[in-house]
Image: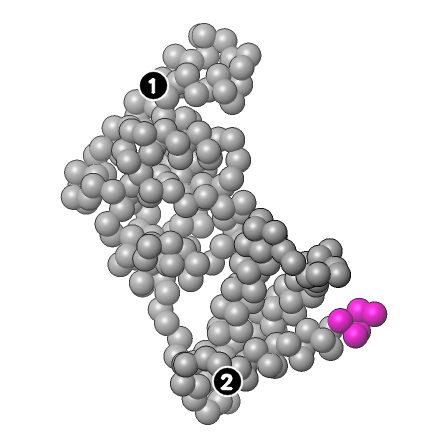
Amino acid sequence: MDKIRFKQAQTLLKEAGQSQKSTEKLKTPQEGIVDSVTYAEILDNIIKTEEFIYSSRPSHRLLQEDAEEFCNQLINIRNRIDDILADFGVLEKENVEEEVKRLSERFILLTSKGNFKKILTRWGVEPLRIVVAGVPLEADDMRILNPKIPETALEPIKKKISHVKNDINRKMEQFNVQEILVVVENDKPGEILAKRAEDIYGAKVMMRDSLKDIDAIEFKKTLEL
């Protein structure tokens, strides 16, 4: 069964690369080296999308949440296919990171964890534009995260919050920007940080279930909105 599914995935991959519906002009392939890691990732992701086919039988109708996840997976597959085609000169390879750097220059980026800063930097965001909060923007929000937190524990948190807000204001002045983009995962700390940033700064929000599964291309599209 796995061999059959693997062959099906290879066929889908081949057809995706030969699609005649695209208005993009494809060039003649040149010699190159296959990125086997990316290729294996594409095949694995195509096979994973079969879950939506089986779970939606017999109508194959997807509700909103499943439709979004299914389409996001297909977009990721398409982007990875484009990476391989670009390696063989079929498509021109866009310097996505440079575009992300340019588009993100109108923002100070606020996130909740240090490893999210690493992801943003990998996408192309200038590190100095990123503020890692690590705490909510209001001390009372800690009670939502931890209802049993003692009053004495809130005092050092208030100091951290003050440092974060000062850092945000300093960077906004330093880079002469007025907009904040919050980039967080779809969990309680992320939701709370995003909501407060919207209230305080009128921030824009990018919230995803897993930031490590997002690539620079998808992030660039968010910046272009």
Residue 190: x and y in percent read 46, 35
Q: Which residue is mark 2?
A: 20
What amino acid does circle 2 point to?
A: Gln
Residue 127: x and y in percent read 33, 47
Where, quadrant-wise, is the C terminus in this rendering?
bottom left
Q: Nearer the viewer, residue 134 or 138?
A: 138
Residue 163: x and y in percent read 30, 26
Residue 56's tag is none
Where, quadrant-wise, is the N terminus in this rendering?
bottom right
Of the residues under marks 1 and 2, which one precedes in the sequence?
A: 2
Magenta-tinted stretch: 1-5
Question: Residue extending furthest top?
Answer: 151
Do we see residue 80 in this rendering? no
Q: CA distance from mark 1 to mark 2?
A: 59 Å
Question: Residue extending furthest right?
Answer: 1
Residue 159's tag is 1
User: What residue appears at the point 28 percent right and 36 percent down from the top-left corner?
Assistant: 202
Horizontal side, residue 152 vs residue 198: left or right: right
Q: Secondary structure at mark 1?
A: helix
Do we see residue 3 in this rendering? yes
Query: For residue 159: magenta?
Result: no
Foreground disc of the pair 1, 2: 2
User: What residue appears at the point 49 percent right and 68 percent down from the top-left corner?
Assistant: 79
What amino acid does circle 1 point to?
A: Lys
User: What residue appears at the point 23 percent right and 49 percent down from the top-left corner?
Assistant: 106
Horizontal side, residue 126 vs residue 30: left or right: left
